[in-house]
Image: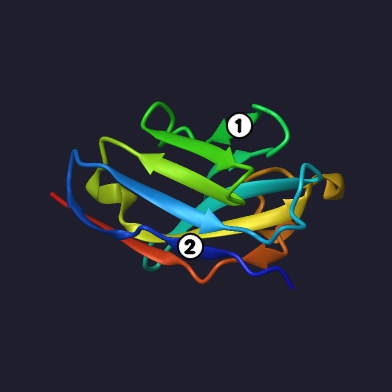
Amino acid sequence: QAQLVESGGGSVQAGGSLTLSCVVPDYITGAYCLAWFRQAPGKAREGVAAIYPDSTATWYASSVERRFTISHDRAKNTVFLQMNKLKSEDTATYYCAAKKKANGRAWADVGGFDAWGQGTQVTVSP
């Protein structure tokens, strides 16, 4: 089972910025899709953004597009989520996840991911 370790969560005022980091195991290569999900209290887990580490292909939920940026540093085995112009509705626990691209599941399909981090809390105050 892959071990993904997130960091970078915290509390920020609306309009502020945070950057989340997720260190992934060495064997996660271009054959994988890396993604960020989030889950707010009482709500289902939802896809936020995803990236193929071996290309520039990225995907974003419409609610975060043009505010969040996902990126990958191969040398550091780390995937980042830069979050700008944060809103109170961005408050959630954020999870890093990985899946093999070959499984054919959509990037935001929670069930398609078989490796998850422990989560990091992001709280945005009005």
User: Residue 44's x, y, as percent?
Assistant: 50, 61
Location of residue 1 by image quarter:
bottom right
Residue located 52% across and 56% down the image: 22
User: Residue 116's x, y, as percent?
Assistant: 61, 66
Three-letter residue code for mark 1 = Thr
Q: Is residue 68 placed above or below 76 in the rendered structure?
A: above
Q: Is residue 47 left or right of residue 68?
A: right
Give the mark, 2 or 1, whose residue is nearer the N terminus: 2
Whether the residues at callouts 2 and 1 have beta carbons within 8 Å, the answer is no
Would you name the residue on which mark 1 appears? 58
Furthest toward the front, the residue is 75
Location of residue 106 by image quarter:
top right
Location of residue 69 by image quarter:
top left
Closer to the camera in the image, 56 or 113: 56
Residue located 30% across and 36% down the image: 84
Which of label 2 and label 1 is nearer to you?
A: 2
